[in-house]
Image: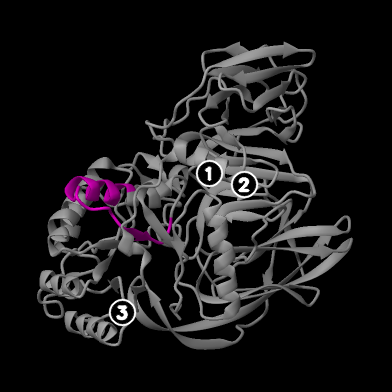
Amino acid sequence: MSKLIHSALSVLPYLLLIGCGEAAVSDPVITDDAVSFNAPQGTVTITALAGDSWRVQCIPDGIGLPKLENLIYTAKTGSREKVSVDTRQGSFLITSASGGSQVKIKKRNGQISFVSADGKVILEEAPDTRSVTIGKTGDLNSLAVSQSFITPKDEFLFGTGQFQDGYLNIRGLTRRLTQVNTQISIPMIISNKGYGILWNNYGLTDYNPSDFTVDLQQGGSDGTAVTVNATGTAGNVRERRVFNDFSGEIEVKESGDYSILLDVGQSMARKHLLSIDGDTIINANNTWLPPTSSAITHLDKGTHKVFVSGSRGDKPSVGVRKVTDVTTFSSPVAVALDYTVFAGTADEIVSSYRNLTGKVPQMPDWAFGYIHCRERYDSQRELLENAHRLKDEGYHTSVIVQDWQWWGKYGWNAMQFDEGKYPDPKAMTDELHAMDMKLMLSVWSKIDKNSEVGRQMNAAGYYIKGTDWIDFFNPDAASAYWKNFSERLLPTGIDAWWQDATEPENDDLKGRMVAGGKIPGEFYRNAYPNMVNHTVYNGLIKDQPDRDPMILTRSGFTGIQRYGAINWSGDVGNDWETLRRQIAGGLNLMATGQPWWTYDAGTVT
């Protein structure tokens, strides 16, 4: 049986690697709030931010790169502090005006360390691991960037968002950060050693990327098949699933703990089942699963047999990374190597992060009560009958939810109720309010192009080409979306808004052009959910200034907390192991500064 092994770098069509080897750096250049120096990888700039935080950026000289919109730092809170530099033998030390942590740079190789006020090193780059690779994404220049940090054996790391692998401590674990149903990617981690790192990149990010990858080979025939009830973007369907067997071998040069990354090779997965030498390492089934999942396992030196059971159409590969005392962030599409370090306790780190990326707004009190949802109410009459029964039987319900398909004959998310089933949405809302009950409505960022709103949006060129998703990176498209939302839905008196599938579903920016067709989607690949929620939140603040907005959304990115959004863990399954994974995923999402999270207690399957 043949095996195909390729390194993580060999598949990237980049033109020039600006090396990681040792080289002296230039003397520092000091401005009021930043220090810069020249290194082999480009100009490195270190900026002192408010709240004992430091931003590090490295950009090659003389390369014309696209100017991306700032989507992370807010204008009101992106304050900077004055700095001073103390030049020493073999290094220079940067101090901010407010004191606190300091930054030390070795002259020999440009290695950066972050030092607490009492002189203790709290974080340091791994020596000679700053990597910047120049290439192309579409017709535009871009960078592939990577930076590693030293990770002591007694360190615990939390964050990167909500994942389905079940890990809480992610030290040494490999994760691929993309936005898909049941996975929310935010490139932020917090350490028990007194620091946090925010990786400032809008695109795909590999956390602890694999050392090598093996493509698995399918067996000679289709495997087992089952027929299940499923929900998808086209509605409720009966789905026949065929599972195939794949196998291969991996060889490791020494015994130790290894992080194993399963990639099914499609935009979404139906099944994660991976075993090594007959021992099950990864096992999860669901209607919706991310394309990747990870686990850490011990492997002895030598060759190991790998088996994967996957769905029809899968082209699985297995990535392997030895767990070492190093943590790495890597992004294949970037305009800078760019990260921010926060010093302090966990509370101080989250506070500083929110000061820079946006405060959490007030949530209405009723949002913390019982929210009743099902898939789905099929009419105004059915929803009200259930609401009255809940009240009559003594179940105090704060919010009842109308899930999808309320648009009926008008087409997907047409922003118009099908009056055959919902004859008077305003009367429905009023009747709920009379019972001290609020209404939440599922609204999407995709719109049927044959609907009235869809025809308007399509004629104006407001879709992401090749999809039904609105191009929220185009300000005119976002404004047109909100205008229809406000005029068509707000008069119904609905209280809360469920922005579904805001990833957008199936990682659909990959290979697309956004911002009016000007920028490859890979540059903004993980940021779409924030653009949707930015539009809705700010629209609600403007058009309903007397209300505190409540938004439930399936995805989010760095700074999602500033839109008062509640995340939930997506369309998950109905077993105890799935429930356990949701708790770990929710806690790691909260480590990225997002305070509001929930999950489908009754599941969707």
Q: Nearer the viewer's eye, disc 1 or disc 2? A: 1
| Residue 599 on the magenta span | no
- Within-10-Å neighbours for mark 2: few <14, some 14–19, many 20+: many
- The circle on residue 35 is none
Residue type at mark 2: give it: Ile
Q: Which residue is mark 2?
A: 190
Kindly tell me whether residue 519 is visible in this rendering.
Answer: yes
- Residue holding disc 3: 376
- Looking at the rendered structure, the kind of residue marked 3 is Arg
Residue pictured at 19% horizontal, 74% vertical: 432
Contact, CB < 8 Å: mark 1 with mark 2? Answer: yes
Examine the rendered structure and indicate whether residue 196 appears above or below residue 236: above
> Front-most of 374 and 2?
374
Q: Residue furthest front?
A: 394
Across and down, in percent, residue 438 comes to 24, 68
Q: Front-most of 155 and 253?
A: 155
Which residue is tagged 1? 350
In the image: residue 119, left or right of residue 558: right
Vertical position of residue 9 compared to residue 246: above or below = above
Q: Are marks 3 and 1 in contact (CB under 8 Å)?
A: no
At x 56% / y 22%, what residue is drawn? 98
In the image, is residue 19 above or below residue 507?
above
Disc 1/disc 2 C-alpha distance (Å): 9 Å
Q: Is residue 260 left or right of residue 572?
A: right
Looking at the rendered structure, the kind of residue marked 1 is Val
- Residue range in magenta is 534-555
**Residue at screen point 41% across, 34% down:** 68
Mark 3, other Cα within 10 Å: few <14 / some 14–19 / many ≥20: some
